[in-house]
């Protein structure tokens, strides 16, 4: 939405409209003298004269109170990530539609065997005029090590080569994709002068530090914040400053999703909503100039099993669960517009399965993505020693079921949970849904206090594109501290039915780690295929659904890139499009 | 002696004497007349009570339907998604986005909501009446102690306290939840009741009862409580209403754990799935709102109607006893004087 300089104009208009009240105090001649020529020019504009202005304000919606938020990207709580993306330049980004990496602050990135060479742009500068140098990167990498950033899981050390070049020394041969995906999480957000002091302090002090007045390296400089919004202005020192056609960038605070829905329905209240789930019925209400940009989230609803449970510790029971659940019904109920099923639950993101599995894919058991295969499930349970009594599947260990946990407030998850539990109970399991505040929901899994429940089956983010991350996540699950009790099995040698008959012996964690240690995708593929095969037989997790992130832009006053453009589906459009000059004022 | 005999003939204030002479059947009949028939007649004479009871009986009926399993349980894909109310009589209130029967959702949680509301109302008003009457009637040290405790509870902000308790205790039992939601509601109400009792205790009939050596519990029960009952009943309803709103609000915010979709949760989902923004999902929002407002409205009407039951003037007039009793009272008072 394009806005002329309303602040001053409206002020003068207000003064004008109320002029008669002050006739006795100030004459029109005196007003002219006070307002001056420029003020009167604006006054003439609002009283019918032609007005032209290049001033453009871009309004992006966000749920959160800016007063409580800060710019320390490592801050445990209250880091304002959309605000951070306005002021910090990214190292590189990933294009989901073209499946390639796009350089930001980096001029070049070379990955050879055990070395990664990072070359930054010569014109990379802080908004206070200081040059960015590898001294800043030095502090950034030291702090990253201190905070346990995952990149350091692959590094032994690093070397500063010159003012704009550094070299990362890998501990093993590592697939270049992994390093690139790791680097997509990095921004030019650490300045030696402001961050150096934390090198000698306890890490918790750094994590709790609220950086309120950031020095910017990205498109915008921070101006102010209040309860309503963050305000930014263009950063003239930004290397792509010519691409930025926005005078004021507002990150406006909204009370929640529904408030953002309302703003988008009105069509003129906001210009973008970075990430917002919108049900299909509401999308139908949007005006034509509201454009949806779908970006694969590589994240989604799944089931986690407690592998120490007498029932769900059995592979046959887990497979029966997979057969019973009609995954398409989950999608239909919870959001057919933005969600889609996993073709086979094998620990790889749905859209990447074909690429990685290749000719193995047709041999994978699908467990019926669009149907409830109750006959197969019945046979599996009967073979495992279960029988149905009073409509419930039982064995000497009791009835299959328990409390099925779901997070409160995640409405689409509750819908998916209801669908899953209804299907399982109709088949003869005995589950009751327990919807808990998010912390409690999570702690049940961390404490292994569950039988089976809802949990995301992909770790999320662009890195989940690379199978190593989701496969390892399912085996190890660091976020719940391995509370699903599969770690011991993951480290043990297992014998499972092989592809095309026979048996396969595999140590799943070892096999998965090898994926990361290959120099190319082709070399990684055989390990991916074997690890995925194990995953879909053993089912450490059950992946059911994945989704698109929904990002909303408007094109009535702004340009947007065409659908096939490499910049179209990059996280996140309101930022990357500005970075690349795709988002231009078009009023 | 003659004076005593005359006086006894004229005024028989020893109620025990007449009670002894009544048979058990007569006593029962008297009890039924005084505590059931008369209040019912008086209450029923009021249009508000009739409508209120009618509304509450609908909820009672829904609770029975759920208890006896006379309507289907809510489940996904029971019907087409987002059917509108009365689009098909098989699903009279329509369905949600995942094809769940909205009437089944409402019925399913009715017993839970009624129990919770009742528990919240009884807890809040029960404690308030107890502390308010004792504090107001006894005065002195007892009053000081109770007032100090009430002040302490009144100083704690209600909603944050309830949220903290809800998060810490994770109440899933409806009765426990009702108590938690009104955990400090009694303090303010107790203080108001105390104020009323302070004025009532100065009444001549209370003084007379004290002079005659009637015990404190008996005075509170027989003379004080009936006078504050209209106020208590109205506040019982207010506490019940507070319980509903607090529960719905906290379920809406996702603070309370739950096992099924109750009215607050349904309201939240209806809201989040566009009930406010699109007519397609509007009924999803409307149905739980009607359920919540209906119950509250029914309770308020009944409480207003009950005001007449506890109002002695209205009660005596409607039962056709006002004149004789007034005459009798006058005679008695004069005689005593």
Image: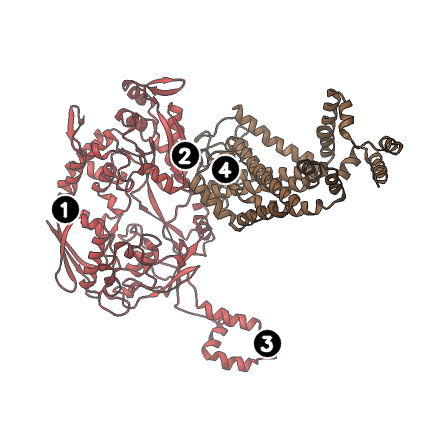
Chain colours: A red, B brown
Would you identify the image quadrant in which residue A509 lies? top left
Quarter of the image where one finds residue A18: bottom right
Tell me the distance, in whole angstroms, between the alpha carbons under discs 4 and 2.
16 Å
**Callout 3 environment at 10 Å: few (<14), some (14 to 19), or many (20+)?**
few
How far is mark 1 from mark 3, CA to CA? 76 Å
Quarter holding the C terminus of chain A is bottom left
Determine the secondary structure under disc 4.
helix
Please tell me if label 4 and label 2 are on a single chain. Answer: no
Give how far apart the Cα atoms at labels 4 and 1 are.
55 Å
Q: What element carries label 2?
A: strand
Considering only vertical position in the picture, is A378 above or below A270? above
Q: Which chain carries label 3?
A: A
Task: Give the residue pinned by disc 4.
Answer: B177
Residue highlighted by disc 1: A174
- The circle drawn on residue A434 is 2
Can residue B141 be seen?
yes
How far, Cα to Cα, is label 3 from label 2?
A: 66 Å
Does label 1 or label 3 sit earlier along the sequence?
Answer: 3
Q: Which of marks 4 and 3 is in front?
A: 4
The N terminus of chain A sits in image quarter: bottom left
- A292 or A125, which is in the foreground? A125
Chain at numbered mark 4: B
């Amino acid at each position: 939405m394009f806005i002329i300089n309303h602040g001053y104009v409206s002020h003068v208009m207000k003064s004008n409209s109320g002029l008669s009240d002050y006739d006795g105090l100030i004459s029109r001649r005196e007003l002219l003298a006070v307002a001056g020529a420029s003020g009167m020019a604006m006054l003439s504009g609002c009283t019918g004269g032609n007005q032209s202005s290049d001033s453009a304000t871009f309004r992006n919606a966000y749920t959160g109170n800016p007063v409580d938020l800060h710019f320390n990207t490592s801050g445990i709580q209250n880091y304002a990530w959309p605000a951070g993306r306005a002021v910090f330049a990214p190292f590189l980004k990933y294009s989901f539609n073209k499946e390639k990496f796009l350089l930001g602050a980096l001029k070049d990135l070379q990955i050879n065997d055990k070395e990664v060479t990072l070359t930054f742009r010569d014109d990379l500068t802080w908004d206070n005029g200081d040059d960015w140098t590898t001294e800043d990167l030095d502090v950034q990498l030291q702090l990253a090590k201190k905070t346990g950033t995952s990149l350091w899981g692959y590094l032994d050390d690093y070397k500063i080569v010159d003012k704009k070049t550094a070299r990362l020394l890998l501990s093993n041969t590592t697939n270049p994709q992994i390093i690139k995906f790791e680097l997509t999480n990095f921004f030019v957000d650490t300045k030696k002068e402001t961050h150096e002091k934390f090198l000698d302090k306890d890490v918790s002090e750094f994590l709790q530090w609220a950086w309120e007045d950031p020095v910017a390296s990205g498109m915008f400089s921070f101006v102010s914040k209040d309860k309503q919004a963050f305000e930014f202005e263009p950063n003239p020192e930004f290397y792509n400053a010519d691409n930025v056609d926005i005078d004021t960038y507002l990150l406006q605070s909204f009370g929640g999703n529904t408030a953002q829905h309302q703003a988008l329905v009105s069509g003129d209240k906001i210009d973008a909503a970075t990430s917002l789930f919108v049900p299909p019925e509401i999308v139908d209400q949007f005006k034509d100039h509201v454009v949806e940009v779908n970006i694969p989230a590589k994240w989604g609803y799944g089931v986690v099993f407690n592998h120490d449970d007498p029932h769900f510790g059995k592979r046959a029971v887990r497979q029966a669960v997979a057969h019973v659940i009609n995954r398409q019904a989950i999608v239909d109920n919870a959001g057919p517009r933005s969600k889609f099923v996993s073709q086979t639950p094998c620990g790889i993101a749905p859209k990447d399965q074909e690429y990685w599995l290749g000719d193995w894919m047709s041999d994978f058991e699908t467990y019926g993505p669009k149907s409830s295969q109750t006959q197969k499930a019945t046979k599996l349970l009967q073979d495992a020693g279960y029988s149905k009594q009073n409509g419930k599947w039982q064995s000497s260990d009791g009835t299959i079921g328990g409390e099925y946990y779901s997070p409160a407030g995640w409405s689409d998850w509750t819908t998916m949970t209801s669908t899953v539990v209804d299907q399982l109970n109709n088949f003869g399991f005995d589950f009751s849904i327990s919807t808990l505040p998010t912390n409690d929901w999570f702690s049940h899994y961390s404490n292994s206090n569950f039988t089976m429940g809802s949990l995301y089956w992909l770790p999320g983010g662009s890195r989940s594109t690379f199978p190593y991350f989701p496969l390892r996540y399912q085996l190890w699950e660091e976020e719940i501290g391995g509370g699903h009790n599969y770690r011991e099995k993951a480290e043990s040698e297992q014998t499972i039915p092989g592809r095309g008959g026979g048996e396969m012996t595999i140590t799943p964690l070892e096999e998965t780690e090898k994926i990361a240690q290959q120099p190319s995708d082709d070399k990684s593929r055989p390990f991916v295929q074997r690890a995925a095969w194990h995953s879909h037989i053993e089912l450490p997790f059950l992946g059911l659904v994945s989704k698109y992130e929904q990002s909303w832009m408007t094109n009535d006053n702004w340009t947007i890139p065409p659908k096939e453009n490499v910049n179209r589906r990059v996280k996140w459009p309101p930022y990357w499009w500005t970075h690349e000059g795709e988002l231009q004022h078009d009023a | 002696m003659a004076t005593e005999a005359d006086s006894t003939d004229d005024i028989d204030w020893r109620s025990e004497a007449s009670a002894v002479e009544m048979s058990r059947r007569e006593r029962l009949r008297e009890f039924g007349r005084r505590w059931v028939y008369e209040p019912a007649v008086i209450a029923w004479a009021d249009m508000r009570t009739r409508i209120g009871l009618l509304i509450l009986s609908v909820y009672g009926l829904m609770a029975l339907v759920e208890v006896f399993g006379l309507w289907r349980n809510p489940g996904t894909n029971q019907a087409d998604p987002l059917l509108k109310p009365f689009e098909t009589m098989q699903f009279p209130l329509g369905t949600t986005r995942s094809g769940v029967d909205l009437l089944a959702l409402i019925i399913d949680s009715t017993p839970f909501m009624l129990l919770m509301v009742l528990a919240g109302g009884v807890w809040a008003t029960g404690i308030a009446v107890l502390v308010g009457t004792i504090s107001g009637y006894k005065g002195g040290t007892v009053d000081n102690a109770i007032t100090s405790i009430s002040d302490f509870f009144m100083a704690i902000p209600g909603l944050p306290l309830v949220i903290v308790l809800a998060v810490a205790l994770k109440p899933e039992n409806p009765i426990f939840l009702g108590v938690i939601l009104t955990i400090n509601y009694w303090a303010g109400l107790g203080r108001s009741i105390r104020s009323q009792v302070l004025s009532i205790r100065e009444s001549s009939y209370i003084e007379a009862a004290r002079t005659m050596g009637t015990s404190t519990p008996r005075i509170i029960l027989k003379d004080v409580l009936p006078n504050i009952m209209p106020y208590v009943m109205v506040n019982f309803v207010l506490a019940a209403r507070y319980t509903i709103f607090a529960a719905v609000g906290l379920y809406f915010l996702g603070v309370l754990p739950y096992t099924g979709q109750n009215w607050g949760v349904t309201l939240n989902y209806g809201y989040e799935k566009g009930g406010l923004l699109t007519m397609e999902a509007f009924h999803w929002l409307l149905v739980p709102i009607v359920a919540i407002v209906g119950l509250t409205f029914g309770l308020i009407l009944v409480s207003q109607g009950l005001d007449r039951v506890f109002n002695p003037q209205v009660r005596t007039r409607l039962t056709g006893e006002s004149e004789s009793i007034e005459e009798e009272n006058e005679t008695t008072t004069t005689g005593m004087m």
